[in-house]
Amino acid sequence: MHASEPTTWIDRIDPRLRLIAAAALVAVAAAANRPSALLLLLAVSLAGLLLSDLQSHHVRRRLVPVNFVMLVVLAVLPLTTPGKPLAALGPLEFSGEGVKLALLILLKGNTIILLMTLLLGSMETTTLGHAMSHLRVPDKLTHLLLFTVRYVDVLRHEAHRLHTAMKMRGFQPRMNRHTYRAYGHLVGMLLVRSLDRAERIVAAMKCRGFRGRFYLLDHFAFSPARDVPFAASSLVVLLIAAWVEWL
């Protein structure tokens, strides 16, 4: 397998460094509880995305599902978190502490998604797996990631074919027992076909001499001119965010 040609400045950075930076910065963002530290990481990720010329629809595609879940969090947490009432709607009371917690979770979720999009969003799956192997991540975990990404789309097409077959037989979804049973059969058949496909893939790989490792023709090369400034900048951002959060 060959690596693709880099198109932006982030693609020219050693993938191993990008993976380490992503893990460290996301860990700090996940542990942070001060908005100032999260806003710093958010500003850095937005600046990096602007400099990397990543298309806006790729960013929106990752942010929309997360923020849809966050809307539910914003609606539920103020009602379930004890604290000083901020507003009331009949018997329902919205606590100020709940609103603050919901906004903090919203900020944290968007910061983590933008950091991951900046550092890993343009990285090919094979490159990510190769970088994980270089960093001594267990092979089974690496293979699980690679096969999951590879076959999620295959299973999606399989589910679409099964659903189309149901419609061709006159199936109309309704809120009744027949619909629930039909969707249960759909999920069961998808699991059966997934298991059958997995067994055939394992057999095919063993026939081709697979012994638990993937080999790439192209290997990573550390570039002092590009990778050292990136590593230093990431370390500075990490230390400043940690200082703002804990010191």
Image (cartoon, rainbow, N blue to C red):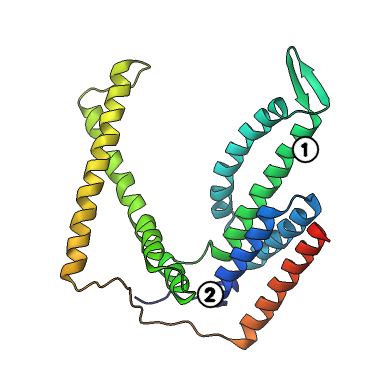
| Residue placed under numbered mark 2 in the picture | 16
What count of labels does the image hold? 2
Residue farthest to the top? Answer: 90
Q: Residue 64 location, x and y as percent? A: 57, 43
Task: Tell me the quarter of the image containing the C terminus.
Answer: bottom right
- Whether residue 83 appears in this view of the structure is yes
- Whether residue 163 appears in this view of the structure is no
Q: Residue 108 location, x and y as percent? A: 68, 49
- Mark 2 element type: helix
Q: CA distance from mark 1 to mark 2?
A: 36 Å
Which label sits on residue 100? 1
- Left/right placement of residue 101 relative to residue 165 reads right
Query: On the image, which quarter does residue 190 sit in?
Result: top left
Using the image, determine if residue 160 lies above or below residue 130: above
Q: Residue 92 location, x and y as percent? A: 72, 17
- Mark 1 element type: helix
Using the image, determine if residue 218 lies above or below residue 28: below
220 or 60, which lies in front? Answer: 220
Task: Tell me the quarter of the image containing the N terminus.
Answer: bottom left
Query: On the image, which quarter does residue 218 sit in?
Result: bottom left
Amino acid on which disc 1 is placed = Lys
| Sooner in the amino-acid sequence: mark 1 or mark 2 | 2
Query: Dot 2: within a 10 Å radius of its alpha carbon, few (fewer than 14), some, or many (20 or more) residues?
Result: many
Using the image, determine if residue 149 lies above or below residue 6: above
238 or 44, which lies in front? Answer: 238
Q: Residue at x 58, y 59 (%)?
A: 116
